[in-house]
Image (cartoon, rainbow, N blue to C red):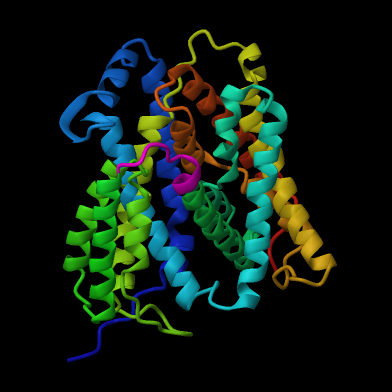
């Protein structure tokens, strides 16, 4: 019997197909904006998103709604894919050595810190808005890579890979922020149960269990316990990913027998073409009736937009320039400074993760969440347009 055909490395597949995922994401965003603003659909859209479906899985959250199922359950699968990608890259990919980790970690750290500081500089005077400091800190990997992919050969592969690795490290930081900064009341019993589920997963991993179903079964229980504990349920996806076994395949396509690779390949299309667009449709619907230019000067809107469109590129470009100047790390071979600037601007697209963190920062406060959406949309659109203009002017990749 012939050996199974090697699977294409998921990062290469991601870079090849993400333009399509980006188009679907943009389409979902446009549909959400239309649905929230057309007189015939606005009320229906709002009712459908917030419709109660039950049951009560967490006393703190009350009956489950469509919005909760999307943000707390479907997005847990998105974070599972993010966790699998992070683990694969650290164990067997571009983050597997100190030399490879240095530049993405430096750029990502500065690319999260500077936008947060920019936000606080604009909106931090209001104590009620300070909780939103992390909203502009995260890059939307789907949108950002999609923009680069749409530019085709004008963008060298090395630049796409650098943006992808920066965004992966960025996701690690976002997960830590969600776990630490946006967790308030803790249900100790549920948290202890989640700890027990993690012990079971660890034992399965250590005993060399390669079937996926035991991990997924225990992972479902872990998700429910984390949901009830008060920690955001999406963290369960990352914790589960950390304990899925991986078989390394250095300098080769992904191992078709590796549980991590199999699960990542199975979930990635669902994440890129269903979960993330569904999240965008449920969260990007901004009601624009009555919105004037003065609203864009609101501290929250302005802080988020400036954090993304200015803080992100200043942080990433400045960190890469300083790292090369000090001899700590260097740009990828053949990548010009103009292309690095274009990458830094594109990284200011914070759509999915920024909207997600905005909902955690101001739970239940509809007016503030609407302002977050406006800030995210403004900052992301400005970042995308500026990045495309810079990269178009940089000439074709050699």
Screen quadrant of the N terminus: bottom left
Residue found farthest to the bottom: 1
Q: Is residue 221 a member of the stretch shown in magenta? A: no
Magenta residues (range): 178-187
Given residues 96 and 218, the one toward you in this image is: 218
Give the percent coordinates (x, y) of residue 150. 54, 51
Residue 137 shown left or right of residue 16 in the figure: right
Which quadrant would residue 320 be assigned to in this image? bottom right
Q: Is residue 170 above or below residue 332?
A: above
Give the percent coordinates (x, y) of residue 267. 30, 59
Residue found farthest to the left: 55
Q: Is residue 324 above or below residue 6?
A: above
Main SS type for the magenta part?
Answer: loop
Is residue 271 visible from the viewing direction of this image? no
Screen quadrant of the C terminus: bottom right
Residue 371 shown left or right of residue 233 in the figure: right
Residue found farthest to the right: 325
Residue occupying image coordinates x 27% and y 17%: 44
Give the percent coordinates (x, y) of residue 230. 34, 40
Residue occupying image coordinates x 37% and y 33%: 281
Is residue 151 visible from the viewing direction of this image? yes
Residue 366 shown left or right of residue 321 in the figure: left
């Amino acid at each position: 019997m012939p050996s199974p055909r090697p699977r294409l490395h998921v990062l290469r597949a991601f870079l090849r197909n993400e333009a399509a995922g980006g188009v679907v994401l943009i389409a979902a965003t446009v549909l959400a904006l239309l649905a929230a603003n057309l007189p015939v659909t606005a009320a229906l859209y709002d009712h459908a998103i917030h419709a109660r479906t039950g049951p009560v899985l967490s006393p703190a959250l009350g009956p489950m709604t469509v919005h909760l199922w999307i943000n707390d359950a479907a997005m847990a699968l998105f974070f599972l894919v993010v966790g699998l990608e992070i683990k694969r890259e650290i164990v067997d990919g571009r983050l597997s050595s100190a030399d490879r980790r240095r530049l993405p970690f430096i750029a990502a750290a500065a690319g999260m810190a500077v936008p947060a500081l920019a936000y606080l500089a604009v909106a931090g005077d209001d104590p009620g808005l300070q909780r939103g400091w992390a909203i502009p800190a995260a890059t939307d990997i789907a949108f950002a890579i999609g923009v680069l992919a749409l530019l085709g050969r004008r963008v060298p592969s090395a630049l796409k890979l650098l943006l992808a690795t920066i965004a992966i490290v960025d996701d690690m930081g976002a997960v830590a922020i969600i776990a630490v900064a946006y967790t308030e009341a803790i249900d100790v019993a549920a948290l202890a149960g989640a700890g027990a589920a993690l012990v079971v997963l660890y034992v399965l991993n250590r005993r060399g269990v390669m079937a996926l179903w035991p991990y997924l079964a225990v992972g479902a229980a872990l998700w429910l316990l984390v949901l009830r504990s008060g920690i955001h349920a999406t963290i369960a996806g990352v914790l589960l990913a950390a304990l899925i076994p991986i078989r390394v395949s250095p300098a080769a396509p992904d191992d078709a027998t590796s549980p991590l690779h199999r699960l990542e390949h199975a979930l990635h299309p669902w994440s890129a073409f269903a979960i993330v667009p569904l999240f965008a449709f449920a969260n990007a619907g901004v009601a624009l009736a009555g919105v004037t230019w003065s609203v864009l000067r609101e501290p929250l809107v302005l802080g988020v937009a400036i954090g993304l469109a200015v803080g992100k590129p200043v942080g990433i470009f400045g960190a890469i320039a300083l790292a090369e100047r000090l001899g700590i790390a260097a740009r990828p071979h053949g990548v010009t400074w103009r292309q690095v600037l274009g990458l830094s601007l594109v990284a200011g697209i914070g759509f999915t993760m920024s909207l997600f963190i905005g909902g955690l920062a101001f739970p239940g406060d509809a007016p503030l969440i609407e302002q977050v959406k406006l800030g995210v949309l403004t900052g992301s659109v400005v970042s995308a347009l500026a990045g495309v203009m810079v990269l178009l002017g940089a000439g074709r990749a050699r």
